Amino acid sequence: MKRLILLTLILLLSVGILRPASTSAQPMNMPLVMLISGDIWTWNPQTDALVQLTTWGYNFKPVMSPNGDWVAYKSWATIAVEAINNNAPMNPGEPAGNIWLLDPFTGDALRIADQSDGAVFGDINGNDNFIARSNPVWSPDGTEIAWTQFNVPAYTSELVIYNLANQTTRVVVSELPIGYEQQGPADVEWGALGFVYLTYNYDQTIEGFVATYYFYDVNGNNYNAITIPVSDTPMHALVWFTGTEFVNAMENGVAVINSTELPQLIDPLTNNIVDFMGILVGYSAWQSLTQGNYVSFSTYNVDFVYGLIWSAQSSDGRYLGDIGTSLSYFDTFAKLAISPDGLSVAYVAEDGSVLVWQNGLTVQLPVSNVEAITWSPLLWTTNYPVGG
């Protein structure tokens, strides 16, 4: 309960035509990975086995490696959990956090980002000294992991990259912009053109808030910043996509998914912004070009309850039917996962259960309180139909 209350407080205070070819080395027997009440679980569709891999209770969204060898996730550090359990004064921003890698088959874990020696969180005199971290993201080739970290008491933010082969961490942006009343790290997304990093600020000229999308290359060079007014409805997702100049004049860009509105496509190279009237589809990075299914979505808004209604299409463009609805105010894409072969789709329902759809049939898993899921890496494109 303390974890849920603290999360609520943080949210209130935070503010070509063919797709890339799949790699044959990917594990087609990958289990579905779920975040349940702060711990990582897996479900094996072949054996129907549920396995709990962690017992910490303060872990966050799992992110599948493009190579299928690791799941990366953020976890609140021991000093933060001890402070919570001792009812210590809470820093108003994100608590101290670490980054972990977890083998989804064996449960073996590796911590790749820890707190500094002498770190302090929840000091009664306010003398905190710790590092808060965002959710991690993988490089497109799966060789590196990135996240932002917010340093207290300096109140500075930086972008770091961890290299798996060398097991080294480097700071690529030492001073990230900090938004209005931002007191913690902000997530980044890593795509073909580098990173996108989002901040919010108040603009007196329009008497409203604006969102600024900062674009960095892999060396940390800021090559563009695009500012647009903030939508009146919640943002569900911010993702990189592939496209084509024949559809939207963008081969690579960022899609902003707001509820009850058309997706906004942003090209960081040309500053072109498009309200996209076509279909944005997601698919497993590991499925073949002409097999497997694709997922699209429409917005859901009933009595100010927001979500996405998922639908399935075949690789030759046939509509296969609605899958189900995930309700969320942010990061709604983390509530959907596609199997490695692209034939099954799992989603988190309104009641926190997980349903798995395949060929028009739906099976409910014996789980509850599910917060996020991942199965295979998801890619998004405006090129539809993609196979055929």
Image: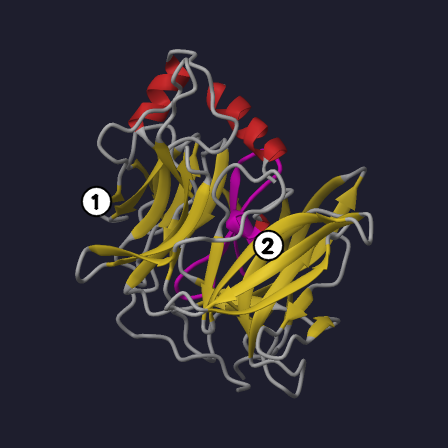
Residue 121 among magenta residues: no
Label 1 amino acid? Leu
- As helix, strand or loop, the secondary structure at mark 2 comes to strand
Horizontal and vertical percent position of residue 171: 33, 56
Q: Which residues are magenta?
A: 333-362
Residue 360 among magenta residues: yes
Per the image, the residue denoted by label 1 is: 110
Label 2 amino acid? Ala
Tell me the residue at 32%/50% (across/down): 71
Choose between 117 and 236: the one closer to the eye: 117
- As helix, strand or loop, the secondary structure at mark 1 comes to strand
- State the image quarter where residue 139 is shown: bottom left
Answer with left or right where residue 345 lies relative to residue 59.
Answer: right
Residues under labels 1 and 2: Cα distance?
Answer: 28 Å
Choose between 78 and 261: the one closer to the eye: 78
Answer with left or right where residue 147 lies relative to residue 202.
Answer: left
Per the image, the residue denoted by label 2 is: 237
Choose between 358 and 275: the one closer to the eye: 275
Choose between 148 and 345: the one closer to the eye: 148
